[in-house]
Amino acid sequence: MAAHTDNSIFIDAPMELVWRRTNDVESWTELFDEYGEAAVLSREENRITFRLSLHPDDNGKVWSWVSERRLDETSRTTISHRVETGPFKYMSLFWEYTEVRGGVRLRWVQDFEMKPGAPLDDDAMAIRINRNSLRQMARIKEILEEAARNAEVLV
């Protein structure tokens, strides 16, 4: 069995700002409240390999993993996958940026399967990912819309 999530949000900000800020992995600790650390391990043309670490959980454990992200600026899409899969058999992510009137529609599609014996099964993880994606997207929307407003004031 496998799982699939698909979430999107409208961001009232210019495409270039949304694209640049959401692909600046080093700043993800500011954009996402769940990450305690985001470290780029390598960068080659349109490919970034990076380690993400969550804030410590209730037991003090820090969960982290390595992912690879490929950026296609022409189509305004990214494709990522976990290199270190942890409890996942696999985890693939597709981000799509669509310019729409007044801003950008940012869409996240995730396909994954949990390993046998993982703390959550596919359905439970899909629920968790959907809930967290909506929360993180709302945060990103707020941050980028404020950045766009501040940029307009500076012009």
Image: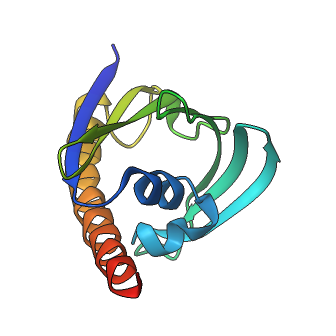
Residue at image coords 31%, 23%: 3
Residue at image coords 26%, 31%: 5
- Nearer to us in this view, 124 or 146: 146
Residue at image coords 47%, 34%: 76
Q: Position of residue 141 (x, y in %)?
A: 26, 63
Q: Is residue 80 above or below residue 40?
A: above
Q: Position of residue 127 (x, y in %)?
A: 20, 41
Quarter residue 14 falls in: bottom left
Residue furthest to the front in view is 155
Q: Is residue 132 above or below residue 101?
A: below
- Nearer to us in this view, 66 or 109: 109
Say if residue 55 shows up in the picture.
no
Q: Position of residue 78 (x, y in %)?
A: 52, 34
**If the image is split into quadrants, where does the C terminus sit?**
bottom left
**Total label count?**
0
- Nearer to us in this view, 151 or 24: 151
Residue furthest to the top in view is 1
Coloring basis for residues: rainbow
**If the image is split into quadrants, where does the N terminus sit?**
top left
- Left or right, 122 with respect to 102, comes to right
Say if residue 99 shows up in the picture.
yes
Residue at image coords 28%, 57%: 137
Quarter residue 49 falls in: top right
Q: Position of residue 38 (x, y in %)?
A: 62, 64
